């Protein structure tokens, strides 16, 4: 699917995505400093509307991954791990980008033992989104 942002303005546009007609409309929310994407997808012919707050989903995903990995790596070789511990997160949530995860990590309230956290997109690009290294 390729949608060029300039194709979407303040009017409804119809696109054919995987053989289904979808209507898309860009709505500004007035906060240029924070990219917040809320998607309302209405598939013509269906009565279901999907609402998705992409920033919230990125934050929930990041929280879940860090919590799961922290639990799995807290004890290593029978001892609580106190040294460097890095986490790489493969972004398989295609609606969220690096900016979404940077905002999510900066609002993270959970304590964890990772000294570095990296975000990896589907093209293999890597970005450090968290560092707590002492060296």
Image (spheres, helix red, strand yellow):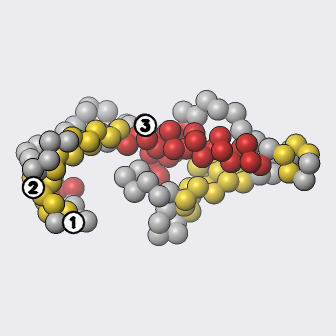
Residue 14 bears which disc, if any? Answer: 2
Q: Nearer the viewer, residue 127 or 51?
A: 51
Residue farthest to the right?
78
Element class at badge 1: loop
Which quarter of the picture shows residue 79?
top right
Do tag 3 and tag 2 residues touch (Cβ < 8 Å)? Answer: no
Q: How many marks?
A: 3
| Residue that appears at 10% across and 50% down | 44
| Residue that appears at 31% across and 33% down | 31
Q: CA distance from mark 1 to mark 3?
A: 26 Å
x and y percentages locating residue 67 in the rendered image: 65, 40
Residue marked by disc 1: 18
- Between disc 2 and disc 1, the foreground one is 1
Which quarter of the picture shows residue 74?
top right
| Residue that appears at 57% across and 39% down | 63
- How crowded pointer 3 is (Cα within 10 Å; few <14, some 14-19, many 20+) is rated as some
Which quadrant holds the N terminus? bottom left
x and y percentages locating residue 18 in the rendered image: 21, 66
* For marks 1 and 3 on the same chain, the one whose residue lies earlier in the sequence: 1
Element class at badge 3: helix
Do tag 1 and tag 3 residues touch (Cβ < 8 Å)? Answer: no
- Is residue 91 in view? yes
Residue marked by disc 3: 56
Horizontally, residue 58 falls left or right of residue 29, namely right
Element class at badge 2: strand
- How crowded pointer 2 is (Cα within 10 Å; few <14, some 14-19, many 20+) is rated as few
| Residue that appears at 54% across and 33% down | 107
x and y percentages locating residue 13 in the rendered image: 9, 52
Q: CA distance from mark 2 to mark 1?
A: 13 Å
């Amino acid at each position: 699917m390729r949608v060029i942002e300039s194709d979407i303005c303040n009017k409804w546009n119809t696109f054919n995505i995987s053989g289904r007609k979808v209507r898309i409309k860009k709505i500004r929310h007035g906060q240029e400093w924070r990219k917040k994407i809320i998607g309302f997808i209405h598939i013509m012919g269906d009565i279901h509307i999907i609402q998705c707050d992409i920033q919230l989903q990125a934050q929930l995903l990041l929280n879940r991954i860090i919590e799961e990995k922290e639990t799995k790596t807290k004890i290593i070789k029978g001892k609580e791990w106190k040294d460097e511990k890095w986490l790489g997160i493969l972004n398989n949530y295609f609606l969220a980008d690096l900016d979404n995860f940077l905002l999510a990590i900066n609002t993270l309230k959970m304590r964890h033992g990772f000294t570095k956290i990296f975000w990896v997109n589907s093209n293999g690009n890597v970005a450090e989104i968290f560092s707590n290294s002492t060296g």
